[in-house]
Image: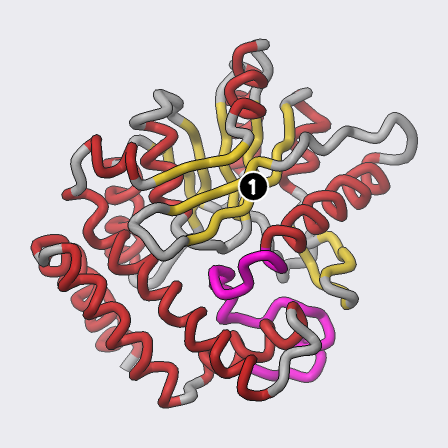
Amino acid sequence: MSTVRDRLTDTLYGAGWSTVKRLPEPVAGALGRTIADTTWRRRGTGVLRLEANLARVVPDAGPQELAALSRAGMRSYLRYWMESFRLPAWSAERVRDGVEIKDIDRLFDGLATGRGVILALPHMANWDLAGAWLAGAGGVPFTTVAERLRPETLYDRFVAYRESLGMEVLPHTGGAAFGTLARRLRDGRLVALVADRDLSASGVEVDFFGATARMPAGPALLAQQTGALLLPVSLWFDDSRVMRGQVFPPVPVPEAGTRAERTSVMTQAVADAFATGIAEHPEDWHMLQRLWVADLDRGSA
């Protein structure tokens, strides 16, 4: 059954990349909204988890407001997928005009000094589009890490897709990626990491919307080891075809404390920046999985 399921998953994603990218943009957008609304009405595990997560972000929301927010969240999530399936067919002009990032000079100024720069992003809006924009219109190729997926053919699809957008993609296995990322940063290059969820033993506990969550130590450790600038980022969609974003001020490396203590302080600062961006645009945070430690302890979806 596992093999059949893996083959079906790979086939469906392959169909998305081969079929959706040929649709006119308004048709693809309408299809995404239809799928999102149908999925939302079925109230499956992912939708219920998204709604529970959003309840922590917007604790004063009543049932109707929370339901409307989770529906908007599913529409945002499907917009990400529809755009991602179509992104390889977008022109350079469409990519350039599809992104506006506030305070992006913090990134370019950091690179201009010869320091490496680490961008830490949450699962918001379309991080693949942001990457294509950086590598294309911004002229800044970068390195990132991709989690191993099943089946292997699906992982290969994602790597090929992201490499076609101008990214260097490293597998998130065995710890070897950290050394390569450090070398890229010492060479004054850019590394971009999605960094709002880490349930492994190495995850750093942070206060996130008033409860304990775990986030990856990698961005803080890389900044300490290489001297690179660590910049949190948030992304969101507006009602037009444009995705917007915000580059937050750099996270400083504390002068005192053990490496673990410095890592904890820096990761908390990243979490605080993420919380600011997510609170402003909660519908564009695509967290359909468990995140908070209390939810893990309860074994909820």
**In this image, 85 relative to 75: left or right?**
left
Q: Nearer the viewer, residue 276 or 167?
A: 276
Specify the quadrant that holds the N terminus: bottom left
Residue 130: x percent and y percent?
39, 40
| Residue at x-position 68% and y-position 30% | 250
Residue 178 image offset from top left, x and y in percent: 56, 35
Residue 52: x and y, percent? 59, 79
Residue at the right extreme? 256
Q: Which residue is labeled 1 in the image?
A: 233
For the C terminus, the quadrant is bottom right
Q: Which residues are magenta?
A: 278-301
Q: Amino acid at mark 1?
A: Val
Q: Residue furthest front?
A: 239
User: Which residue appears at 55% of the width and 81% of the height?
Assistant: 65
Residue at the location (39% across, 64% down)? Answer: 76
Question: How many badges with numbers are in the image?
Answer: 1
Instruction: Give the image's coloring scheme.
Output: secondary structure
Residue 287: say if magenta: yes
Q: Residues within 10 Å of mark 1 (few under 14, many from 20)?
A: many
Which of the two residues, 166 or 218, is positioned nearer the viewer here?
A: 166
- Residue 173 left/right relative to 299: left
Question: Within the image, what quadrant is residue 207 found in?
Answer: bottom right
Q: Quadrant of residue 161?
A: top left
Classify 188 as above or below 280.
Answer: above
Give the side of residue 54 with respect to residue 98, left or right: right
SS at circle 1: strand
In x, y percent, where is residue 214? 69, 59
Q: Quadrant of residue 151?
A: bottom left
141 vs 240, nearest the viewer: 240
**In the image, is residue 298 part of the stretch drawn in magenta?**
yes
Q: What's the residue at 63%, 76% (across, down)?
A: 55
